[in-house]
Amino acid sequence: MKRLFTHAICMVSLIIICNKVKAQSTDKIYLSLGPEFGIPVNTVSDPYYNTRGIYKDGFGGSFKLELPVLPQLHVTITAGYMSFKAATRYVAYPGAAPGPYLLGGIATINGPPYEYIPLKAGLRYYMVRHFYIEGEAGDAIKANSVTTSQFIYAGGLGGIIPIQKRSSIDIGVRFERGYKSVDYNYSMGEVDFRVAYRYQFK
């Protein structure tokens, strides 16, 4: 119930932001869509915990809506999907699970992937015409039984490569933190790379 309430608050906040920005923005609206590649990095000083010992590299995708408030300042709304393979292995008897790796008569299998649906809102500031810095915050909604819904935040930079009058490529890198699993009460940090097709509607 608490998580549902938090999700509802996030969605209402996004709607309010959209309405306010629409009333003040210029007539240009941008939408980008593309894949993302995440590299987990260790963010906790704990001798018994290492991020790379739990999460392998992740892959997903996202779409981002940009609503300009000023020519250089845009409000962003992002939704996507991220999946990180599990680095931790579970021990089982041979034949207890399909396709196990047999080590000394004992089977070890990788756990299920850690899957999330991130929903974020933020600001993007264009320092010059095609280069920007941005910050985002929101909620990573659990997408399977081994993850938990958590608050996430991110910051990064990137650039726009024009293709045609209304089309371009958005290339960005960011640091993001907040993802958690049911087994480890630590926030996972990641360096994320995104390459997306960006379209200007007006």
Image: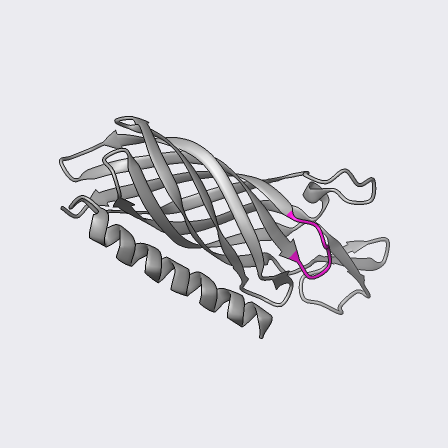
Tell me where residue 36 appears, x and y as whole percent.
44, 44
Tell me where residue 185 appears, x and y as whole percent.
72, 54
Tell me where residue 8 appears, x and y as whole percent.
46, 68
Q: Say above or below: 178 vs 19.
A: above
Q: Residue at (53%, 57%) from the top-left corner?
A: 140
Residue 173: image quadrant is top left
Magenta stretch?
181-187
Residue 183 within the segment the image draws in magenta: yes
Question: Relative to 125, is 24 on the left or the right?
Answer: left
Q: Residue at (62%, 68%) from the top-left corner?
A: 145
Q: Say above or below: 49 vs 11.
A: above
Q: Residue at (37%, 58%) from the top-left corner?
A: 14
Q: Quadrant of the N terminus?
A: bottom right
Q: Say above or below: 162 vs 9.
A: above
Question: Relative to 6, is 20 on the left or the right?
Answer: left
Residue 114: image quadrant is bottom right
